[in-house]
Image (spheres, rainbow, N blue to C red):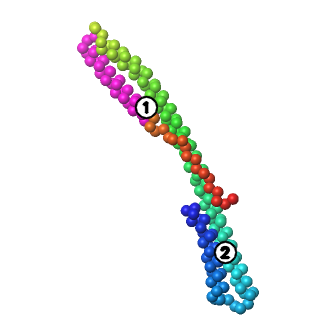
Amino acid sequence: MELLLLLIPAVLLVLMLSLMVFYQVSGIGQQNSAASREQMNARLIDNFVRSLAVAENTIYSKTAALNDMAQRLTLSNEQLVQLNSMKSKFLSMVVHDVRTPLASIRGFSELFAVQVNATDRQKNMSKQMIIAVDRLNRLVSDLTDLARTSRVPAPVRLPFLAFIG
């Protein structure tokens, strides 16, 4: 797209110059007076300059629009990096705050299961608690893996486009 915008003035220049050469060689529309040729050349040059000015304005406006989009993308990228960091911190806190009590619950459940005076029902309940704690520990491990795998690499910096000084 940018290449097309840069080629427009060059194409217009070549077109105008080829028209000038064509008129010079063929003699179409020319009178034998030098004044009429100068007027025609002046009109052609004036038309070319106008076309070139329009092309430059178009390029300038497109460049400004692209720079605006690049700024918005950079801002969005920075916000995404910040949100991802917040998510990772949240998951880390959840993992820590859930694992600590689970370790205590598992330890006490194992103690209840091996007590000498515990009934079969109490031992069975202790084993069920241990199974549930292990299931929760696997879930917490999955959350930890999710926090590790979803980290975003370093942010991409988009250069600003400056075609017209």
Horizontal side, residue 25 vs residue 94: left or right? right
Residue at x 63%, y 69% (from the top left corner): 9
Q: Does the magenta run of residues contain 115? A: no
Whether residue 4 is visible, yes or no, is: yes
Kind of residue at disc 1: Thr
Looking at the rendered structure, the secondary structure element under dot 2 is helix
Residue 103: x %, y % from top left: 40, 20
Horizontal side, residue 154 vs residue 127: left or right? right
Main SS, magenta region, reads helix
Horizontal side, residue 82 vs residue 140: left or right? right
Residue 37: x %, y % from top left: 71, 85
Residue 54: x %, y % from top left: 65, 69
Residue at x 43%, y 31% (from the top left corner): 144
- Circle 1 residues within 10 Å: few <14, some 14–19, many ≥20: some
Which residue is denoted by mark 1 in the rendering?
Answer: 144
Q: Quadrant of residue 4?
A: bottom right
Q: Quadrant of residue 58?
A: bottom right
Marks 2/1: CA–CA distance: 65 Å
- Residues shaded magenta: 118-147
Which residue is denoted by mark 2 in the rendering?
Answer: 48
Residue 102: x %, y % from top left: 39, 22
Residue at x 65%, y 81% (from the top left corner): 20
Q: Of the residues under marks 2 and 1, which one precedes in the sequence?
A: 2
Residue 76 vertical placement versus 136 (above, below):
below
Q: Does the magenta run of residues contain 134? A: yes
